[in-house]
Amino acid sequence: MTNHDSNLTGADIRAKLDHPIVDADGHMIETTFAILDFVKQVGGADIAARYEAALSADTTSSKRLAVWVGNSGPATIDRATAMLPKLMYNRLDEAGIDFGVVYGTHALRVLRTRDDELRPVVYRAMNMLYADMFKDVSDRLTPVALIPMDKPEEAMAELDFAIGELGLKAIVMNTLINRPAPEVLKEAPHLAHWTLAPTSPAMDVGDAYDPVWAKCVELGVAPTCHDGFRGRGSTHGSPSNYAFNSLGSFGQGSDYFCRSLLFGGVPKRFPTLKFAFLEGGTGWASQLFNSLFEYWEKRSLEALSKNLDPAKLNVDLLVEMFEKYGNEYLTPERIRGNPHHPASSQLFVPPEEVDDFTPAGIEGPEDICRIFNDNFYFGSEADDRMTAVGFDTKLNHYGLKLKAIIGSDIGHWDVPDMTKVMVEAYEMVERDYITGDDFRDFTFSNVVEMHTSMNPDFFKGTVVEGAVGKFMAENKAV
């Protein structure tokens, strides 16, 4: 949105505000040599060599993304900023950011690691690296731990280590897990990698991951999703066009996990657990939220019983209409002989057996509103004007304001100048897309609520501790 020739910086925007800015999703850029140092420390020289070879074998993405590195102007200093936490710390005021939650960039690749031997080693090494890199800047920056979700026991072990031992406070999970077709894996394992399909740890898995969600509650961490739906087998799988693959991919990945949580009943079983869906924006969330009410009206248990139960079909009326309006092949005799067309309507099962909502803890439309309000947060970037729809009380059912949280994405190609991020974000206020109070929620209140509701001490010892304490006291009073 912004005219980047403007002399305004994030510091100018921050000076206008009476509240801090907490960045819910900034990024670091990990150096390969540092990663390998820690992989070697955890897994030994042979594992480190294997991982280095795996990194060298996959250069397609890096070639497509590297073009921004040679830019003049702020790109080089911003790249160094993303690589050096102490430099990032020193430049936060320029960006207008008081406190930042920092995600890895190589982490997004680690989240897709399928090798059962490499995966636990690399995840642990990355978490040790993050804890070490950010240990001296914790009053303004906190890194995000990586939690593997391919197997529940792996997730439990890494949660205990990263949070319990390293003391990290925020997590990101691989919530879109590509698994091969079991039939192919059994009969032709060498071809199994060609049959990968997305699966979720929250849908169609029963209670297998409930110990993981319970562990998150116990340790006081909010699971976050940072998965893009792209690659072979997806609708974002071009081998030649990065922009084609990138557009909307994080929104689709977030939508997938959000629907999985909802219909998998996770908020029903863990009502205090908060989830954040990052980098996809709020537009998809508003569409999903509002669409759910339309589905409820037509596919709730009551609606199924009333309108869609094949057993209640009025066959006599159907025959009468065929007599009046049929022809030589649409005859009353033929429809009376087999009235349930198309064939898919021949599902003579009790409506409760096809009820998708009650198992999810949704017994009325107000429950949809409650889950979105109490459990879900939506990471949105500064230049995404569709964030405004999340705050539109006329558009959203029940007048709900979805809980958008700002993700600067500093450190990535789509932020050519980190000092302009908050300038872009504030344009939504200047153009009357959102109010000043909405902006406060977007850049402070919502992300603070998400983390402190899980861990009241999340911001203890940070530069925003006082403002957070005041917010918590006011919020408790309300």
Image (cartoon, rainbow, N blue to C red):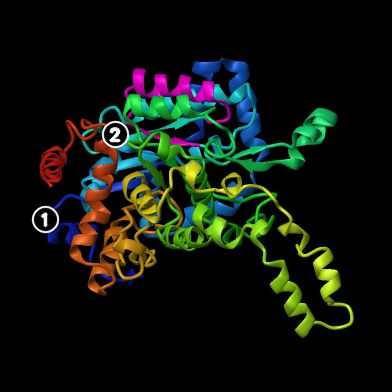
397 or 306, which lies in front?
306
Residue 307 shown left or right of residue 1 in the figure:
right
Residue 281 shown left or right of residue 93 in the figure:
right
Residue named by callout 2: 454
Expressed as whole percent of the image width and height from the top left, the position of residue 119 reads 58, 26
Among numbered discs 2 and 1, the one appearing first in the sequence? 1
Quarter occupied by the N terminus: bottom left
Residue 420 among magenta residues = no
Residue drawn where x is 22% and y is 50% of the image: 444
Residue 164 among magenta residues = yes
37 or 103, which lies in front?
103
Residue drawn where x is 69% and y is 73% of the image: 317
Task: Give how far apart the Cα atoms at labels 2 and 1 are.
Answer: 25 Å
Q: Residues within 10 Å of mark 2 (few under 14, many from 20)?
A: some
Residue 90 appears in the picture as rendered: yes
Work out whether 192 lies above or below 154: below
Expressed as whole percent of the image width and height from the top left, the position of residue 221 reads 34, 32
Residue named by callout 1: 18
Residue lying farthest top? 44
Work out whether 456 lies above or below 393: above
Secondary structure category for the residue under label 1: loop
Residue drawn where x is 56% and y is 56% of the image: 305
Q: Amino acid at mark 1?
A: Asp
Q: Which mark is residue 292?
A: none
Range shown magenta: 149-173
Expressed as whole percent of the image width and height from the top left, the position of residue 165 reads 35, 17
Work out whether 279 lies above or below 85: below
Tell me the mark number nearer the camera, choosing from 2 and 1: 2
Q: Amino acid at mark 2?
A: Met
